[in-house]
Image: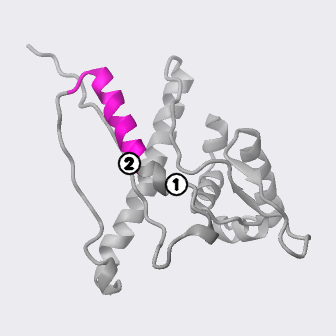
Amino acid sequence: MIRALAHPARMAIIDALSSGDELTATECAELTGLSPSATAYHLKFLERYGFAEPAPARSDGRERPWRAASRGTSLDLDTSTPAGAEATITVGLAFLDSSRAVAEEFIATEREEPEEWRNVAALGNADLWLTPDESRRVTAALTAVLEPYRNRTLADRPDGTRRVRVTNMLSPHRRRDPA
């Protein structure tokens, strides 16, 4: 699974398919800058690890679109080995960079947005004192809030919708010596 996420082109493909759109290798290639054949290789690699799956053929039957195997990315990587810990750092930071880039782009251009989309970006944080079990319950509750909006296809998206990135992040502060 880590190898599936370790390539920037695969991360871009996962991000594009997470929109709910069904895209061909050629359409994904436009996003990654790779050739369609190289992109097809990455799509098959992502399929092997459960990130992408073939979608039904388009009306002409010649194009083979792909879709996300599931919406949203939640990672539970093994940090018990040095290689696993390093991979967790690499994948985690790439995930944060991607989400930060989406937010930065919107914040920088928000004044150019239609009125109804201005002031919808939400920035906030809360430092809480939680046990590990409470931390898991908070994460589950935040995930449950998003569930009704997951897996919308093009056919069932309400008018006026657009892709919105919601990032749940529960990060314990680094443990400090109480003394």
Residue at 29%, 70% (x, y): give it: 120
Residue at 36%, 64% (x, y): give it: 103
Residue that badge 1 annotates: 150
- Extreme-top residue of the structure: 179
Report the span colored magenta.
130-145
Residue 76 placement (x, y as % from top left): 51, 31
Q: Nearer the viewer, residue 149 or 133?
A: 149
Residue 47 placement (x, y as % from top left): 75, 45
Disc 1, SS: loop
Q: Nearer the viewer, residue 162 or 159?
A: 159
Quarter the N terminus occupies: top right
Precedes in sequence: disc 1 or disc 2: 2
Quarter the C terminus occupies: top left
Residue 39, by quadrant, is bottom right
Residue 26 placement (x, y as % from top left): 77, 69
Left or right: residue 142 versus residue 156 is left
Residue that badge 2 annotates: 145
User: Mark 2 is on which residue type?
Assistant: Val
User: Mark 1 is on which residue type?
Assistant: Arg
Q: Nearer the viewer, residue 143 or 155?
A: 155
Residue 42 placement (x, y as % from top left): 75, 51
Does the magenta stretch mainly form a helix, a strand or a loop? helix
Disc 2, SS: helix
Left or right: residue 63 versus residue 3 is right
